[in-house]
Image (tube, rainbow, N blue to C red):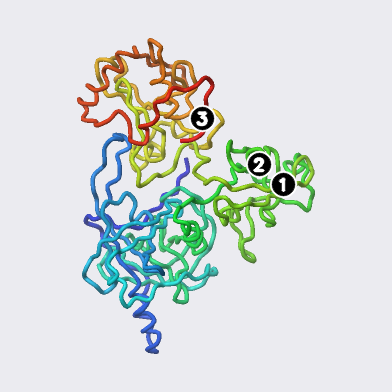
Amino acid sequence: MNVVKMRCLVVLGVAVVLVPLAGRAAEDVAVGEGKAVKSDRRLKEAIVKIFTIQNPPDYYNPWSMRGSRGITGSGCIIKGKKILTNAHVVSDETFVQVRRYGRSRKVRARVVEVSHDADLALLEVDDDSFFEGIRPLELGRLPEPQQEVMVYGFPLGGDTLSVTKGVVSRIEHRTYVHSSCYLLAGQIDAAINPGNSGGPVIVDGKVAGVVMQGVPQADNIGYMVPVPVIRHFMDDIADGRYDGFPSLGVVMERMENADLRRRYRMPEEYTGMLVVKVVPGSPADGKIEKGDVILEVDGHPVADDGTVEFRPDERTSVAYFIQAHQIGDQMRVAVLREGHRKEIEVNLSRPMEADRLIPMEQYDRLPTYYIFGGLVFCPLTKNLLSTWDGKWYSSAPRELLALLSDNYVTRERDEVVLMLRVLAADVNEGYHDYSNWIISEVNGHKVRNLRDLIRRVEGSQDEFIEFSNDHGQRIVFDRRKAQAACDAILETYHIRADRSPDLASAVEAPSAGSRDAGR
């Protein structure tokens, strides 16, 4: 698996190696007129340092937490007495404080809105005096390539505000490290380091983006969440609820090969992308078909390489015009079907993560688990894979990693149920070394998700409970013995409950041929 490693730019509350900043502070360049100095002072006063105590869960022991750690990041004050920062600065938080530029006192803050997809969060401070004398920063516009930017924040190497200067190298879609979402991003060459996360990228005195990640192997390559993504987040939460970025629900292939174009009867003047899969339950399901060629999205032509022009002479992924919508919006799609152009209207009814069989990074929630007969069951998630170590993409079991290559729900399965490991006890003797089983059936019935497994187990009146994996191997329990052993196993391993709180209601027996459509 070809993986490009990147880093989210926070500072852990431990000793760090000091790294000199490359770039000049604003004090060195904003000389001359007093008006410019005053403007720079007002801008700095809207920058805050964020102090977070995080306590992430332990996905290998899903009833436990990993323990507290302290990190720092940056943010800026915007209208409505809100502080804009990165989601990864405050994810899995138990305690958050903020400190204004030039002040010594830290003030308690709380997270009020968060988009882990876009790596953005809004904080509030109940003490109104914290905002006295501050002019909130305004959102600006998407900068042009080679346009000069200033980055404000509190990176490692000191405790005071740092300001560095650079240019926008390019604007295009990138994978966000925090969420693995593929969204619009801006590359900048201003010097950024751990601690800069959440700090504003300023153009003409306004926020053009928020610093989010860098490439440790490269010099002065960093990325920001650009202002269109920030505005999408702000518009999304205007109704008091975060919905996310919509997905059309199709998997597409480039059509740059001449024979491929001929096979699907593409006229010379047309360009587009071939649909190779339609995700079940997605907005495209029942409207767009496998073998269709997507020609346009909302009237914007789609190139054979899967890009669209979002500004004159600038291109990025076709996802740009899909993600510009909010959940619930209507969108027009032009397709070529069997040589004929067809206009289709779809309702973008669900977010990107609903397409995924294996959830990507999850935050601010406890892991899901279920214990029966000492067997620990859980959904396969990116969080669980990352417990193998920092190089999980090469050290995690290959069978599990392979599922990431086609990570889409099917009509039969919307969650991969894993028998993670066995809590050794008399009732499960002979199975003590079993681990990382993908459970395909319970008593001969296909398993759709973990809730379905629980209903199959707890709704059964059979003498035995039989779990089968994808290879046909089996674990068999006497149902009554396994149920009777539950309390003793939980007591032995100091586990408070046999399931996570979100599964408390997953006990009703399944009807014949039933299919749980939700998670």
Residue toward you, 3 or 482 = 482
Contact check, label 1 and label 2, Cβ < 8 Å: yes
Q: Position of residue 70 (x, y in %)?
A: 25, 54
* For residue 508, above or below residue 68: above
Q: Which mark is residue 413?
A: 3
The residue sitting at 47% across, 76% down in the picture is 204
Q: Quadrant of residue 283?
A: top right
Residue tagged by mark 1? 335
Outermost residue on the top side: it is 463
Residue toward you, 350 or 265 = 350
Classify mark 1: helix, strand or loop. strand
The residue sitting at 57% across, 55% down in the picture is 325
**How far separated are the C-alphas under marks 3 and 1?**
29 Å
Q: Give the foreground label among 1 and 2.
A: 1
Q: Estimate how packed mark 1 is, as few (under 14), some (14 to 19) or many (20 or more) residues with alpha carbons within 10 Å.
A: many
Residue tagged by mark 2? 275
Tell me which label, 1 or 2, sits earlier in the chain. 2
Tell me which label, 3 or 1, sits earlier in the chain. 1
Q: Estimate how packed mark 2 is, as few (under 14), some (14 to 19) or many (20 or more) residues with alpha carbons within 10 Å.
A: some
Classify mark 2: helix, strand or loop. strand
